Image (spheres, rainbow, N blue to C red):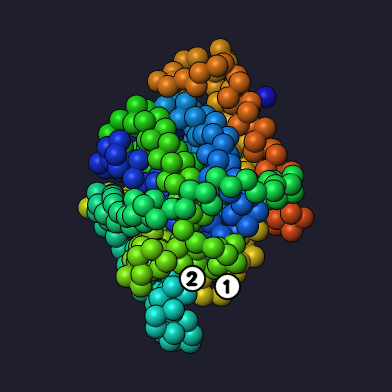
Amino acid sequence: MHEPSTPPAESAGLRRALGRWDLTAFGVNIVIGGAIFLTPSLIIGHLGTWAPVIAFVTGLAVFCIALCYAEVGSRFDATGGPYLYTLAAFGKFVAFEVGWMTWFTRVSSQAALVNGIALAIGFYAPAANAGLTRVVLILGIFLLIGFINWRGIRESALVINTLVIAKLAVLGTFIVVGLGFVDWERVVAPSSLNATDLAAGALLIIYAYGGFETTGIPSGESHDPRRHLPFALVTIMVGIMLITALAYIVVLGTTTGIASSRTPVADAALGFMGPAGALMIGIGSIVSITGNVTGSILAGSRVLFALGENGAIPRFFAQVHARFRTPGNAIWFSVVVAVALALTGSFAVLALASVVARLLTYIGVSAATLALRREKFAGQVPPALFVVPFGRTIPLIAIAVALLLVASATGPQLIAGGIALAAGAILFALTAWRRTLGNAQG
């Protein structure tokens, strides 16, 4: 049995500058990326007119997982999120795997998203999708976002908050205007639905809700994360569930043949707002993805910082810039890796593993919620300032939902996830060996 590992109460050197709405914007920014603009056609193709209802119901399932993050996160005020939670509950090895997989998910998503920005810009300027122009564009995006993250947490928060307001304004306009053009007979008309399509559509929606789990990662830069994180997570999930369901209603009720569209929201906007509406959605999707990348670099670098701060990887990654008080080494390392993945296209392979990585993190945190309630942890970790109601019921539902998703993963996804876990285990062993060797020589 491992000795419980309690992380530091505050991440030394980082500036506490985030309030509850900053944390909320950070989480919304990660969840609303490109999926809400691009996946409705796939989901409606599986679910038909049931899509809005099932989007809300599956949102409730994800909400159970988010509530677990809210409870366990209300115990900690240091940087690291899921890594810290599992470190306290299950010890160094499990925590390292969770931290490694969390960083892995963020860095691979950064690479995929920046490629998405290049493709979106390439729709208007085809040269952006090829040759040196594409390389310069990708490098420029990463360098700019990396610089913003390095410059300071307040600067990062201001950029993220601005981009969140912009993307919500675009989606809000689409929904409010679109509801006036909805053919409600088309929305409420019952469509056939079989078990296979139900499972496929629900899984796509659940993955589209992903990203809320990063909200607690920058807690060491928040004024009062133990109280603000539960507020942020509940607000995020309620808001995202409503936006998603309403967006599906507008797409369903204003457009025919949407299941075959590659740009369903833009096509719907074109129908009831004309070319200006389609352009608004196109710009909104670029803004949305850019914000998502900004948040992903912030989240990924803070996980590396937490790993370094706790000695799980070299403390080089825990160094804080004297002036900006940001983990510069962790930020620029994450940027360099993401650039390499983006330019080589390797992110497409790693995306398979990132699906399993996210689900294992869900399981670890949901299980940590139950573990940290045990009496043995009293006095070792701070008490929860927010407790999920109904006892063990919601954490057990959260674990069941995550296990169901793992069981539904494809063979290649499971293999890729297993390889990523094995790589993490090797890194953990090498780091432990290096530390032992250093102690012996010292």
* Mark 1 → mark 2, Cα distance in angstroms: 9 Å
Measured as percent of width and height from the top left, residue 229 is found at 38, 33
Measured as percent of width and height from the top left, residue 35 is found at 50, 57
Inspect the image, locate mark 2, and give the three-letter code of the amino acid beneath it.
Asn
Q: Is residue 382 left or right of residue 276?
A: right
Q: Which residue is painted at 60% across and 67% down in the image? A: 260
Find numbered disc 1 in the image and state the secondary structure of the residue it sits on: loop
Q: Is residue 85 left or right of residue 386?
A: right
Inspect the image, locate mark 1, and give the three-letter code of the amino acid beneath it.
Gly
| Image mark for residue 345 | 1
Counting residues from the N terminus, which is met first, the one under dot 1 or under dot 2?
A: 2
**Which residue is the site of mark 2?**
115
Q: Is residue 440 left or right of residue 251?
A: right
Q: Which residue is painted at 55% across and 22% down in the image? A: 372
Q: Is residue 345 above or below residue 416?
A: below
User: In front: 440, or 90?
Assistant: 90
User: In front: 82, or 122?
Assistant: 122
Q: Which residue is painted at 34% across and 31% down in the image? A: 228
Quadrant (top left/top right/bottom left/bottom right) for the N terminus? top right
Measured as percent of width and height from the top left, residue 130 is found at 49, 85
Q: Which residue is painted at 36% across and 52% down in the image? A: 180
Q: Are marks 1 and 2 in contact (CB under 8 Å)?
A: yes
- The quadrant where residue 239 appears: top left
Classify 10 Å Cα crowding around label 1: few (below 14), some (14-19), many (20 and above).
some
User: How many marks can you see?
Assistant: 2
Which mark lies nearer to you, 1 or 2? 2
Measured as percent of width and height from the top left, residue 380 is found at 48, 19
Task: Determine if residue 268 is in view.
Answer: yes
Find numbered disc 2 in the image and state the secondary structure of the residue it sits on: helix
Q: Residue furthest top?
A: 375
Q: Is residue 337 above or below residue 322?
A: below
